[in-house]
């Protein structure tokens, strides 16, 4: 398919803010995709691979500016100047290319397949001359492109497509295109997305226009899945009412959620962000191979840090480094040891278990896991209908340095990717939110050269709304913990725009922020501002889809007034 055709669809999607219109535009487009062209689905969401694929284009705005400059023979400074004026690098590219085309009257046909082919080569490039090779792949595309195409290619490259499409819009469009918008179909499509995390695969299934095919979608050990999420409760009484009694109550460990897969004697570990972290946790791989029976399986777990000497548990922020660190792993493993706590099972010896009742799944775990304290355990659990017993268990969890408890309905199934009312979390009131960094400001004096304050945002139906500015809780130097220097390095490739000292940042880095109070505020787009916000940790493991929503902030604001 011509890239122009896809760009026109992007443009139509961008030009309306109405969700139903977007769904209709997308649905009409999906029907037109021919056999063999299905990879275009990834481009539709601004990606080049399925969700679980870790290969990234690794392109920042500076590289795009360089490519544009070379392709058009326009000074980089001029492009940056235009960017500051217009605010969107995509529109700058569009304008510059339109101008050039008027002079050279060049025509050519760029296909979406060619765009994908070049973009997919980018992550493969390594070592010497990488930048130049990347540049030439991008320039090749810019050389044969119209203004509109350049706008969307640029936005794809910097990861800021701005067409207002979310996974749910694609789901509804698939349902409309192939099942007349049937509600049941939408649900089944969502379930399949949660299991497979590959929109192209789902598209191919939907194309058969047979709901049964969607039912047949199974988990595949080795392929990451989205985890089931918990709703919050404030009291045990409320929890009992919600999940029914008797129910299972477990420790809520304060660690890293890891989904463990075993297949052909190999173990794979994935975060809730679907990132493969097998290399980062060699001891977990050993424990699984040595202490869990079964040919193949998928387990849900929380990996918790502990102090080797005192044998006490440590909070998440003390071991958060283990998620990302790819060097000196053996050293880190000794310094920050972890214990695996298995709390669910989704697949066992070729059988998908997500429709099995929790009481049976939890029994199975206890049959197949050999528990070795401070290596691997089944999550600590009681099954009860007694409020006092439950309260005692909650106190015990807190005394053991855990975050609180989870309450689980014994009859419930496992719903990948959903926040469900049959698994609840309860922890002491704690004023913290998981937010995403969307902006910042370069510091002055000792901190010049670093971004030293950060704008953080919550989510609201796919948009990110600002709730405050944080500069405390971050260290000056790297040795002392997470530093301005390190954070600046992480953020640089994500800068979408700079305006004087201010930077606009692509939402990607999730952080835990504590605060003392929520206030109404006209300064920030959410309408709220956090008072005395303080940085606690980076949540490398949490996806954007799980950050605090505006609703939760509104609710906390109301509670606080009461
Ligand atoms: P949430 O992430 O908001 O759904 O909060 C629940 C989180 O608690 C899960 O994602 C897990 O990472 C963590 N967790 C700790 N212990 C357990 C447990 N026993 N069962 C389920 N989740 C647990």
Image (tube, grey):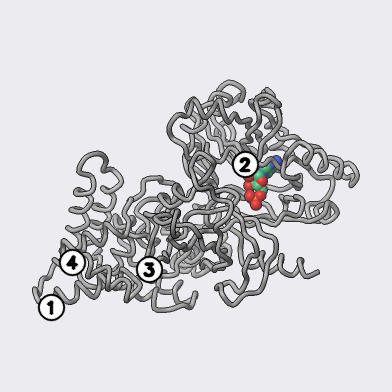
- Tell me if I can see residue 371 in this picture: no
Badge 2 vs badge 1, beta-carbon distance below 8 Å: no
Q: Considering depth in this image, is 102 or 177 the residue closer to the camera? A: 102
Mark sitting earlier along the chain (2/3): 2
Q: Is mark 2 within 8 Å of ligand 1?
A: no
Q: Residues within 10 Å of mark 2 (few under 14, many from 20)?
A: some
For the point 33% across and 55% down, the residue is: 39
Mark sitting earlier along the chain (2/1): 1
Disc 4/disc 1 C-alpha distance (Å)? 19 Å
Q: Considering depth in this image, is 445 or 527 the residue closer to the camera? A: 445
Circle 2 is placed at which residue position? 316
Mark sitting earlier along the chain (4/3): 4
Answer above or below: position of 472 versus 439. Answer: above
On screen, residue 440 versus residue 39, left or right, reads right
For the point 66% across and 34% down, the residue is: 341
Badge 1 vs badge 3, beta-carbon distance below 8 Å: no
- Tell me if I can see residue 320 in this picture: yes
Mark nearer the viewer, 4 or 2: 4
Mark nearer the viewer, 4 or 1: 4
Is the C terminus in the top left, top right, bottom left or bottom right quadrant? Answer: bottom right
What kind of element bears circle 3? loop
Answer above or below: position of 20 versus 303. Answer: below
Circle 3 is placed at which residue position? 500
Spot occupied by residue 80 in the image (x, y as percentages of width and height):
27, 68
Circle 4 is placed at which residue position? 75
Taking the image in four quarters, ligand 1 sits in the one at top right
Spot occupied by residue 561 in the image (x, y as percentages of width and height):
77, 70
Spot occupied by residue 246 in the image (x, y as percentages of width and height):
84, 45
Spot occupied by residue 42 in the image (x, y as percentages of width and height):
37, 57
Disc 4/disc 2 C-alpha distance (Å)? 47 Å
Disc 1/disc 3 C-alpha distance (Å)? 33 Å
């Amino acid at each position: 398919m011509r890239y122009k055709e896809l760009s026109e669809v992007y443009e139509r999607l961008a030009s309306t803010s109405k969700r139903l219109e977007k769904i209709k535009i997308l649905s009409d487009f999906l029907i037109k995709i021919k056999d063999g062209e299905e990879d275009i689905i990834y481009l539709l969401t601004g990606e080049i691979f399925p969700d679980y694929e870790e290969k990234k284009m690794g392109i920042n705005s500076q590289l795009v500016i360089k490519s544009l400059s070379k392709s058009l023979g326009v000074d980089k400074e001029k492009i940056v100047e235009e960017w500051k004026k217009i605010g969107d690098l995509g529109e700058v590219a569009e304008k510059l290319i339109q101008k050039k085309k008027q002079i050279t009257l060049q025509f050519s046909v760029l296909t979406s397949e060619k765009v994908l082919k070049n973009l997919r080569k980018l992550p493969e490039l390594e070592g010497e001359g990488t930048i130049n090779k990347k540049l030439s792949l991008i320039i090749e595309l810019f050389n044969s492109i119209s203004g509109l195409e350049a706008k969307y290619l640029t936005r794809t490259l910097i990861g800021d497509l701005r067409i207002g499409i979310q996974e749910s819009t694609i789901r509804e469009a698939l349902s409309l295109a192939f099942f007349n918008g049937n509600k049941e179909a939408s649900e089944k499509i969502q379930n399949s997305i949660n299991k497979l995390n590959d929109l192209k695969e789902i598209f191919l299934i939907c194309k058969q226009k047979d709901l049964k095919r969607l039912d047949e979608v199974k988990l595949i050990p080795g392929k990451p899945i989205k985890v089931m999420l918990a709703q919050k409760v404030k009291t045990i009484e409320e929890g009992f009412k919600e999940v029914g009694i008797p129910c299972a109550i477990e420790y809520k460990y304060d660690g890293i959620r890891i989904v463990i897969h075993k297949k052909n004697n190999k173990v794979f570990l994935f975060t809730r962000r679907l990132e493969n972290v097998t290399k980062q946790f060699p001891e977990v791989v050993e424990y699984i191979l040595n202490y869990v029976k079964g040919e193949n399986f998928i387990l849900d777990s929380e990996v918790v840090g502990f102090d080797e000497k005192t044998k006490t548990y440590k909070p998440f922020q003390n071991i958060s480094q283990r998620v990302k660190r790819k060097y000196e792993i053996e050293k880190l493993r000794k310094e920050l040891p972890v214990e695996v706590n298995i709390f669910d099972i989704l697949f066992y010896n070729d059988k998908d278990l997500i429709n099995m009742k929790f009481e049976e799944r939890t029994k199975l775990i206890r049959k197949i896991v050999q528990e070795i304290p401070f290596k691997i355990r089944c999550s600590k659990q009681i099954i009860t209908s007694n409020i006092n017993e439950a309260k005692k268990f909650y106190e015990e969890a807190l005394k053991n340095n855990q975050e609180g408890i989870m309450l689980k309905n014994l009859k419930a199934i496992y719903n990948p990717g959903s926040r469900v009312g049959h698994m609840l979390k309860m922890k002491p009131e704690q004023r913290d939110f998981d937010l995403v960094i969307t902006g910042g400001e370069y510091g002055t004096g000792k901190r010049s050269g670093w971004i030293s304050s950060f704008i953080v945002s919550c989510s609201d139906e796919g948009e990110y709304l600002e709730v405050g500015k944080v500069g405390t809780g971050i260290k000056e130097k790297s040795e002392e913990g997470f530093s301005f220097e390190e954070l600046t390095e992480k953020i640089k490739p994500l800068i979408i725009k700079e305006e004087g000292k201010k930077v606009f940042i692509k939402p990607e880095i999730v952080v835990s922020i504590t605060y003392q109070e929520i206030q109404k505020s006209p300064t920030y787009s959410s309408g709220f501002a956090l008072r005395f916000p303080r940085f606690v940790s980076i949540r490398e493991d949490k996806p954007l889809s799980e950050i605090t929503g505006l609703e939760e902030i509104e609710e906390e604001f109301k509670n606080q007034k009461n």
